[in-house]
Image (spheres, grey):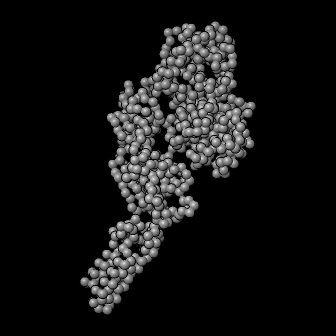
Amino acid sequence: SRSARVLLSAMGAAATRQPSAANSQHYLPMSAATSSAAVTTFRLDLCRGGLPLCVFTFLGLLVVVLLVSNFRHATGGNSAMAGTTPIAVGTSQFAVIEETVSMRAGTQLTRQWPQRKRLVSGNVEWVVTHSRANIRSAPRTSAVVVGHRTKGQIVTGRQHGSWLELDSKLGPGGVNHSEGWMAIHLVFKRGLVQFLRRRTTTYVQIRRGNCKESGIFPIITYMVCSKAAAALGYRDEELRVQKDTLLRPEGCHVEVHGNGSIVVGMATNPNNQGRGALTSSSGDESMEPLCSKRSYPDPATGFMTSAAVRKRVQQVDFALAKSKAACKTPDTPCAILWGVSAQDLYRQGLGKSLAKFQPLRAYVEYNGCDWVVSKDIAQEWKHWKLAPFWTQELSLQHWQVRWNMAHDCTSLSLTKFSTATIPAKCEGFPGLLNDRAFASFTKSRVFNGPGTDAGGVFDSAYDLFLQTFGPRLVQRNPPYGTAYVGLRLPPNKTHDVACIRRFTTPLLKHWPHMQKVFVVNVSSEVLVDIRFVLGSQFSVLSSASSSDARGVDLTLDEVVGLASAAILIGDSDDQVFSLARTINVHLRVDVGRLHPWCFDVNKNKTCG
């Protein structure tokens, strides 16, 4: 009938009326005044059809008014929406669910679930396809390596031929500051090597819920977050990495504050994992996730399982075997008869001695000479769970005969390795091994190059350090079965509360979520003070005090404990800390990790 059609038309108009511009962000329906006017107009018009029809029409319109009134009551007028009442917006139905949580003192935020979204498609990203892809200071293979990415990680940037100029972060005015260059592909003697693969994705800003509930993925990479923010229109906002414990959406998000300011944030605290959009109860502040239709690797922690450590040590052993095969073959046999024990190196300062010994190892091997030791030296070295470096092991009797026949290494300074007057002797052409050639070797590409895989010989001393400590790394059980912080207080200094606070403040500032700590070089009394300063939420374990009679064994344990840590805090002037940091770096060459992952208290800055 005509009356029924008019009634349905009036109800449809009331249900689908769009919100005003001022209230559009709250998804409010039409105003109450408009509702009343509609009721009066249609009541007068339809009552002309008779009393039964008038009553029926009036009751129908009353239901519409009550629904609108209930909706306005549930959403609190101009405040954020609440309740679970279905609301008609256009032609789609949705239900809003909220969960109120406390973000900070005096502020209540409301967590709301998916509804509106804003997206930009066609964004280019690059996937690392090689086990290790170096970041260089310039687009050439001879440029300085300033970092690296591992297989599966995502980077962004601008392509220039076979090189990618990396994006770093958004500075003032939305200016992109380059972080470095990565090769997309390079041609070596063995053929083309692919390092990066291009992919495209869509970035989405969601107003409610988390990325997963919308069928997309959180952005947990700093570089991608910067690109996504720029793509979605936030080019003038500087990206802030937020490591605090405040409630924030997981990963990349945008914060709109009551004063009108906008912040692009990257929440890295694991406690925010899975958290979605947040809106204040007053409706004037909100935090909205930026998501992607492509997934990203889980956040790197730097933790390595025992199997991963064993695999990495095996890789290094294989690489050194290839390095040795690429060394020279001398016209006449030559050798160094090495009479320096591990105890001698420890007395001279283990870190400093090994830092000098490893390049010497490479120099002797590159010239095709052998390392010869006595059975006693070999047994002591193995007793400390250190890997053999020698090519010949002689009985004491045979050793003594060779020692007496060999000549002093007059052209090569070796006294720095031991207090003995003659720590080693040489066999072969006199002067073949000399200080001048050794200094030239340590500065050459042969020693400092990328290794045999890229046409070189050695990868500096990194492989040698890791090979030396390989057996101890594989056999030792770490203090924790997950990622932990390695903390070493400076030797020969008073470990009072002021000193402890200097070394624990970086932990609380940069890695407050890393609550498992392994401390070396402290007494039991100092360990109690460290636990007090950090608080009960931290688990703190320690090795024995450095005054323990174990000497070499204890120091080696400390080095390996720090080398196995995901985060390092210490003093760069401390030889043990520097040695552990070197091994730590090369152990994780193919493992993603937090950035920064190291803090030098002496220089008061991050060191990795």
Q: Position of residue 298 (x, y in %)?
A: 48, 47
Question: Which of 212/239 is in front?
Answer: 239
Quadrant the N terminus occupies: bottom left
Within the image, what quadrant is residue 72 found in? Answer: bottom left
Res 142 visible: yes
Asked if 8 appears above or below 412 in the picture, the reply is: below
Relative to residue 494, is residue 81 drawn left or right?
left
- The percent position of residue 204, horizontal first and vertical second, equals 39, 54
Q: Residue at x 66, y 35 (%)?
A: 490
* Whole-percent x, y for residue 551 in the image: 71, 30
Examine the image and state in which quarter residue 154 appears: top left
Q: Quadrant of residue 557?
A: top right
Instruction: Work out whether 99 lies above or below 592.
Output: below
Tell which residue pokes out farthest to the left in this image: 2
User: Which of 501/438 is in front?
Assistant: 501
Total residue callouts: 0
Check the image and name the residue furthest to the bottom.
51
Q: Is residue 224 visible?
A: no
- Residue, x 65% and y 11% (percent of image)? 403
Look at 47% across and 35% down and name the residue there.
147
The residue lying toward the viewer, choosing from 287 and 451, is 287
Residue pictured at 56% horizontal, 45% vertical: 510
Instruction: In the rendered view, tell whether residue 171 sits above or below residue 350.
Output: below
The x and y percentages for residue 83 are 47, 70
